Amino acid sequence: MQIRSLRRAEPFATADGSTIRSLLDLSTAPVQHQSLAEATLSPRGATERHYHRQSEEIYYVTSGRGEIEIDGARASVEPGDAILIPPGAWHQITASGDGDLTFLCCCAPPYRHEDTHFS
């Protein structure tokens, strides 16, 4: 059984510029097909526009407000919104409110820094 508390997860910066607290990934559990992390962007912060060759991502917004851009299409996001990001899709998320934008990030296959591409 694998249970990991968000309270004990150490934050780190990902290659795209968000602050992540990994819950279950290749470094914390014997996962095989997916990973789960909480990402936070400070007010008016944004990830660097990027894509993943292999990983399909789902973002689930838990607090704050923002804007997601996927392959040129833009939409506002708020708590309760789930966002699908297919492999190979260029994307960027921006915090648009006065508070942090926090979201869960599920990746399949599991997130790896090496699968984040900027050009």
Image (tube, rainbow, N blue to C red):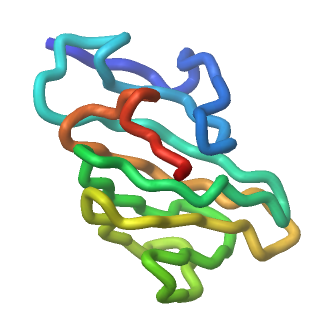
Which residue is painted at 59% across and 35% down in the image?
15
Which residue appears at 64% of the width and 24% of the height?
Answer: 11
Give the side of residue 103 with respect to residue 40, left or right: left
Indicate left or right for 26 with 62 as reference.
left
Residues 80 and 90: in front is 90
Relative image position of residue 104 (x, y in whole percent) = 44, 50
Residue 22 lies, in percent from the top left, at 46, 27
| Direction from residue 87 to residue 1 in the image, left or right | left
Percent position (x, y) of residue 57? 31, 54
Residue 94 sits above or below residue 33 on the image: below
In the depicted structure, whether residue 22 falls above or below residue 34: above
Nearest the eye: 119 or 65: 119
* Quarter in which the N terminus is drawn: top left
Residue furthest front in the image? 119
Q: Quarter-wise, where is residue 108 in the image?
A: top left
Residue 53: x and y in percent read 29, 48
At a point 37% along the width and 36% down the height, the residue shown is 115
Residue at 36%, 11% in the rendered image: 27
